[in-house]
Amino acid sequence: MNFESIIPIIQSYGIQIVIIVLVAVLIKNIKAIILATAVVFILSYFGFLDISNFDFSGIIEKITSLIGGIEWQKLLVR
């Protein structure tokens, strides 16, 4: 395998590679990194992970509302 054949792979899986690197930095566990790598590539292979038109604002909004709901539950329990 020469270097010219690696470049299209990096270009087509660039975002997946970035996700895997971020997970690796966050987790620092080799088994979890291998599992995350497998999941990301399987999802992208079957087309479930199409990040070309991905909406990050919707995900951030859902996470914010989830965290806000957890904070309200903590206040109500006290």
Image: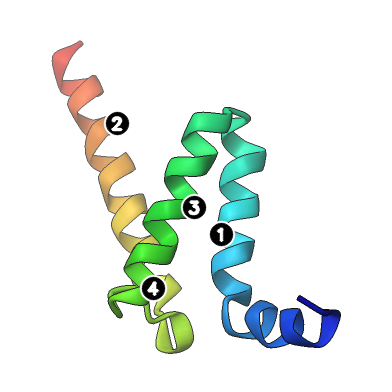
State whether residue 12 is above or below residue 16: below
Helix, strand or loop under label 1: helix
In the depicted view, which residue is nearer to us: 53 or 49? 49
State whether residue 45 is above or below residue 25: below
Amino acid type of the residue tagged 2 in the rendering: Glu
Q: Label 4: which residue? A: 44
**Other residues around mark 4 within 10 Å, as few (<14) / some (14–19) / many (≥20):** some
CA–CA distance between discs 3 and 1? Answer: 9 Å
Which x, y percent locates residue 76? 15, 21
Which x, y percent locates residue 5? 73, 85
Q: Is residue 13 rendered to the left or right of residue 70?
A: right
Amino acid type of the residue tagged 4 in the rendering: Ser
Whichever of callouts 4 and 2 sits on the residue coming sooner in the sequence is 4
**Other residues around mark 1 within 10 Å, as few (<14) / some (14–19) / many (≥20):** some
Helix, strand or loop under label 2: helix
Which is more foreground, mark 4 or mark 2?
Answer: 4
Q: Are marks 3 and 4 in contact (CB under 8 Å)?
A: no
Image quarter in which the C terminus is found: top left
Which x, y percent locates residue 48? 28, 74
Q: Residue furthest right?
A: 3
Image quarter in which the N terminus is found: bottom right
CA–CA distance between discs 3 and 4? Answer: 11 Å
